[in-house]
């Protein structure tokens, strides 16, 4: 038996996280935040003694790939509107976002065997329930036969505005020009990288959210998914 898969690709700040959470809750589908996966693997590899703090130290690619294949990863929506990340029964949501773990993630992401193990892990997540897959290459590489594919984007300026507002609401200072520059640089890297560049699948719905609020995005994507035969109970 195959379960429905909806892929939501696009750049950071376009509103993918909010959309994916609402879809997962409305459909009671499993959620996949692919952007967190390399951080999870990096953290767990370090905890297992397979990765050191010294970047020049040799990396045990084979055993990190084996560890990756055995991970039980769940992205669990909470009533607060946030998503908890549970790995092998333990929440790691508060651990994987720091810069140190980001360094671990960069190192394991360069390992071909780990990339292969993660590809299989992601695809296996669709074997037990419907799946909402959030990422940059979900519809092109990981789930090329997904039931519904969306590429959600927004202008760099709109995404910078949203990030500034997020930081201000959190009581943090925000430099709009620095944030805008960082977003443009990341877009350049993601769109021009040699492996799995960020781009819409040929059969994806392309939606620009620059002038749309979260509810308008959700309603548009809901209608699109319904045209693909995906049934909402609400």
Image: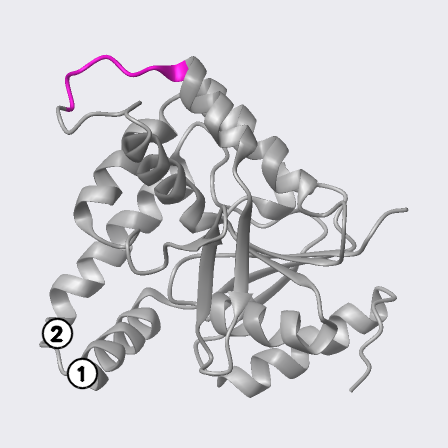
Q: Position of residue 9 (x, y in %)?
A: 54, 55
Query: Which residue is drawn at the image coordinates 50% and 46% (left, top)?
Result: 88
Q: Position of residue 165 (x, y in %)?
A: 25, 82
Mark 2 residue element? loop
Crowd tier of the residue under label 2, counting other residues whose Cα lies within 10 Å: few below 14, some 14–19, many 20 or above:
some
Q: Main secondary structure of the magenta part?
A: loop
Q: Is residue 92 above or below residue 45?
A: below
Which residue is denoted by mark 2 in the rendering? 174
Which residue is denoted by mark 1 in the rendering? 168
Query: Which residue is drawn at the image coordinates 85% and 73% (left, top)?
Result: 231
Q: Is residue 43 above or below residue 233?
A: above
Q: Nearer the viewer, residue 180 or 3?
A: 3
Relative placement, left or right, of 66 versus 138 is: left
The reply to whether the magenta stretch includes residue 57 is yes
Mark 1 residue element? helix
**Circles 2 and 1 in contact, beta carbons < 8 Å:** yes
Relative placement, left or right, of 230 versus 91 is: right
**Residue ranking furthest to the front:** 89
């Amino acid at each position: 038996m195959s379960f429905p898969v909806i892929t939501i690709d696009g750049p950071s700040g376009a509103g993918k996280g909010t959309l994916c959470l609402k879809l997962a809750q409305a459909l009671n589908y499993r959620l996949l935040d692919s952007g967190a996966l390399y951080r999870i693997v990096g953290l767990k590899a370090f905890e297992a003694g397979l990765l050191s703090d010294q970047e020049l130290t040799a990396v045990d690619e084979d055993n990190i790939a084996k560890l990756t294949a055995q991970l039980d990863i769940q992205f669990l929506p909470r009533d607060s509107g946030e998503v908890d990340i549970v790995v092998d029964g333990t929440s790691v949501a508060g651990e994987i976002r720091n810069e140190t773990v980001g360094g671990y993630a960069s190192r394991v992401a360069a390992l071909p065997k780990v990339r292969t193990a993660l590809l299989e892990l992601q695809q296996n997540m669709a074997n037990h329930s419907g799946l909402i897959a959030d990422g940059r290459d979900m519809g092109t590489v990981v789930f090329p036969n997904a039931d519904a594919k969306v590429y959600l984007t927004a202008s760099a300026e709109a995404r910078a505005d949203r990030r500034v507002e997020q930081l201000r609401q959190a009581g943090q200072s925000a430099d709009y020009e620095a944030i805008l520059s960082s977003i443009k640089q990341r877009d350049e890297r993601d769109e021009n990288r040699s492996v799995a560049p960020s781009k819409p699948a040929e059969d994806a719905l392309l939606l620009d959210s620059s002038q749309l609020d979260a509810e308008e995005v959700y309603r548009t994507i809901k209608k699109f998914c319904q045209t693909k035969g995906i049934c909402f109970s609400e």
